[in-house]
């Protein structure tokens, strides 16, 4: 007796377990974030992030942290499937298209392009904040350099 799921007629034994590390890697790559940048955002080393991306399972607490840094939910990471994402993009399916709702598996977005735009907006926002921080630090360093010059002139 074959047991069928909602996943296009596959049996339960045909369904591969979700590899959360791969999902994290692909989402990170899609938004254009480097591994070391995500690791830094999470407070980890790049080696720790690499190990995590190679892990099939991820501690729920870590998954929540990563999801927050990527601008998605942990559910999005758990349900992310590259083949489905490509299918959705190619066919212009929205979640409101109930005929494909169970196949698509994305409950948190109206359209995949909206999610990608959200990713890129978050990436740009973070990039602009980092540039502002670098500019602020540069001004402080220049100011300190001027103070040091004044102190040196005062000693001579």
Image (cartoon, grey):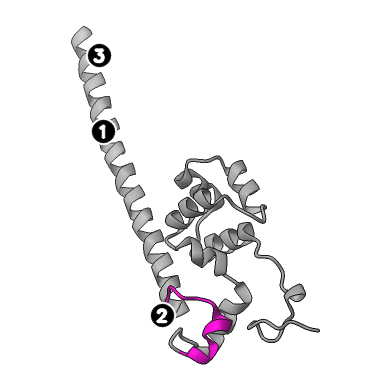
Identity of the residue drawn at 23% across and 26% down: 146
Identity of the residue drawn at 47% across and 54% down: 64
* Tag count: 3
**Residue that badge 2 annotates:** 110
**Residue that badge 3 annotates:** 152
Q: Mark 2 or mark 3: which comes first in sequence?
A: 2
Kind of element beneath mark 1 = helix
> Residue 118: x, y in percent?
39, 68
Asked which quadrant contains residue 111, the reply is bottom left
Identity of the residue drawn at 27% across and 26% down: 145
Residue 100 falls inside the magenta stretch:
yes
> Residue 17: x, y in percent?
69, 65
Number of other residues with Cα within 10 Å of mark 1, as a class: few under 14, some 14 to 19, many 20 or more: few
Instruction: Give me the C-alpha separation between circle 3 and circle 1.
Output: 18 Å
Asked which quadrant contains residue 87, the reply is bottom right
> Residue 7: x, y in percent?
65, 82
Image: 9 above or below 125 = below
Q: Nearer the viewer, mark 2 or mark 3?
A: 2
Magenta region: 97-109
Number of other residues with Cα within 10 Å of mark 2, as a class: few under 14, some 14 to 19, many 20 or more: some
Kind of element beneath mark 2 = loop
Name the quarter where the N terminus is drawn: bottom right
Q: Residue furthest right?
A: 1
């Amino acid at each position: 007796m074959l047991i069928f799921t909602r996943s296009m007629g596959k049996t339960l034994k045909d369904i591969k377990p979700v590899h959360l590390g791969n999902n994290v890697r692909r989402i990170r790559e899609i938004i254009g974030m480097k591994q070391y940048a995500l690791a830094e955002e999470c407070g980890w080393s790049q080696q720790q992030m690499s190990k995590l991306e190679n892990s099939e399972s991820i501690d729920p607490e870590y998954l929540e942290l990563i999801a927050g840094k990527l601008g998605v939910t942990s559910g999005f990471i758990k349900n992310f499937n590259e083949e489905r994402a490509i299918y959705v993009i190619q066919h212009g399916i929205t979640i409101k298209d109930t005929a494909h709702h169970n196949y698509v598996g994305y409950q948190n977005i109206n359209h995949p392009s909206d999610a990608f735009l959200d990713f890129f907006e978050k990436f740009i926002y973070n990039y602009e904040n980092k540039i502002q921080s670098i500019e602020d630090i540069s001004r402080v360093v220049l100011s300190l350099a001027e103070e040091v010059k004044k102190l040196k002139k005062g000693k001579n």
